[in-house]
Amino acid sequence: MSRPAIETSREPSGPGSGPMLSVRNLGIIRARPEGERVTAFEDVTFDVGRGEFACLIGPSGCGKSSTLSVLAGLERPTTGAVLIDGEPVTGPGPDRALLFQEPALFPWLSVRANVELALRLAGVPVAERDERASTWLVRIEVARLADRQPHELSAGTRQRVALARALACEPKVLLGDEPFGALDALARERLQGVVERERVERAGTTTFVFATHNVREAVLLADRVFVMSAAPGRLLAEFRIDATRPRTLEDALVSRVVKEIHDLLIRQVREP
Amino acid sequence: MRRWANELGAPLLGVVALIAIWALVAAVTSTSAIPSPADTWTAVRDGITDGTIPEATLKTLIRLAFSFVVALAIGTALGVVLASFELARRSVRPMIVALQITPFVAWVPLAVIWFGVTERAVVFVAIAGSFPAVTLATLQGIRQVPPLFVRAGRTLGATGWELQRTVVFPAALPSYMVGVQQAWGFAWKALMAGELIVPAAGASGLGHLLDRADGVASILAVVAVIALIGVAVEYLIVGVIDRRIRAKRGLLLETASVP
């Protein structure tokens, strides 16, 4: 393991220099109630650069969700560490936002109040909250639903509001734990479009790390795809995707990478 | 207007049918043990005009409000504490369940020994009979908050008391309201039993009125007032608050279709 504090000449650290997000030898061992110890995933190491879009992909149970929980600061790893902009992660923080598979909007608050609560918790002054919430509701195309309650919206719209809530806090890193996993094909496509547009508009100021089990989604969105093995999860391969954006599945490079990752994953599932 | 007619029509039909059967039975038996609806109405009117029913109603409602507010305060605070500390929950919860099951009338002798034949004894019975329901509902509500909300709140930056206040308590509110609804009913029943059994000198209340009533018509008149107050609180206050909370979150099953 490198120790940035000592090896400053080789690996500069601290805000603004090194990679935005650095995952080092991450692993989680869980204790079952019977006392048995099970390795969820181990020795996961990767970096994500500033403004990059990374996807973690792997079969169910490979630990991609748990990895995201650690990145979000919701769970502590058994081994290894995560650095955000050179700082070790010790808990949740306003530098990161997490999208869940379920929209996780608070059902007792209106769409606008959900966004404003997030801003309040992120420490945005009262005077700025209203305007900032409005800006983001317009940007994510949910402004006319601002006074609705979450239960009045479709699943896709709820997830768009969750995206607005996350982005309104202007995190350095947007994490997504299969954020489109529970949506129908149309809603999924629309949300992918919104995320792609935000990636472009935020021009490298926001780093994205999404977990998914959808190979096409990963290849359409990501600059780099990290493929994880079946449980216990390990990092199997890394794909750098240089296809031009906006991408389509008809693109020769895209379809070739989709097939490669797909074949790699199939072998994972088939092996005993 | 049509909605009101729809909602009130059937219950009114039930009341009219009951009064009709009652009138019939009273006419056929013609004993003083079963006064007619008209005699009972006269007793109600007399009670209202001579001021005894309004005074007793007011005193009883003040007692009810006081006991209910105290029960809510004790019950909620205890519920939050039990939800926060594992050992406290495991050691105290069974006792609260025992209290909840104990018939509130069982408290009356003790209350009289501690507080004498006074109004305070009555209020004590009402509080003891109703706070366990609030505690158990608070505990249940907090423990059943979906973990997703807590995770979402934490990633947004809420911790400790702020997480409780902004996420856990609001999420627990619908379950809590079930306890509130039960608790007011328990407080009401305990209060009536207490007032009836503890004839505190100089005290006035609907239960006391029941104890002192002369004639079956007067007793029935007080019973009718007691029942009416119960229905009013249930439908016009507690029920309305509960429906509002659940409607806001999409927890009401029926969605009105506009014809």
Image (spheres, coloured by chain):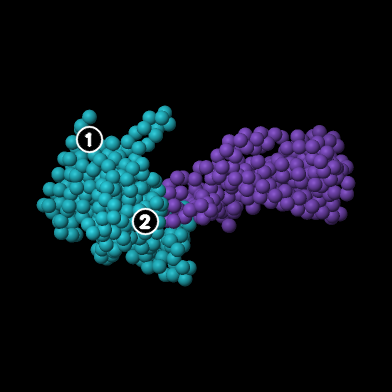
Chain colours: A cyan, B purple
Q: Is label 2 in a helix, a strand or a loop?
A: strand
What type is the residue that disc 1 sits on?
A: Val
The reply to whether dot 2 and dot 1 touch (C-beta < 8 Å) is: no
Q: Residue at x 59, y 46 (%)?
A: B80
* Quadrant of the frame with the N terminus of chain B: bottom right
Pointer 1: residues within 10 angstroms few (<14), some, or many (20+)?
some
* Disc with the residue nearer the chain's start (2 vs 1): 2
* Residue nearest the viewer, comparing B100 with B77: B77
Residue A227 appears in view? yes
Residue B48 appears in the rendering? no
Q: Which residue is mark 1?
A: A269
Q: Residue at x 17, y 52 (%)?
A: A240
Q: Nearer the viewer, residue A79 or B180?
A: A79
Q: Residue at x 53, y 53 (%)?
A: B161
Q: Are marks 2 and 1 on the same chain?
A: yes
Label 2 crowd (10 A; few <14 / some 14-19 / many >=20): many
Left or right of residue A202: residue B135:
right
Residue B182, position as x, y percentages in the image: 64, 43
Q: Residue B62 location, x and y as percent?
A: 75, 53
Q: How many marks?
A: 2
Seen at 32% across and 38% down, the residue is: A40
Q: Which residue is mark 2?
A: A97
* Separation of residues labelled 2 and 1 (CA atoms): 31 Å
Q: Chain of mark 1?
A: A
A184 on left or right of A119: left
Q: Percent from the top left, x then y, of residue A186? A: 28, 52
Q: Amino acid at mark 2?
A: Ala
Q: Which residue is the extreme one toward the left?
A: A252
SS type, badge 1: helix
The residue lying toward the viewer, choosing from A1 and A144, is A1
Residue B51 horizontal/vertical position (percent): 84, 55
Image mark 2: chain: A
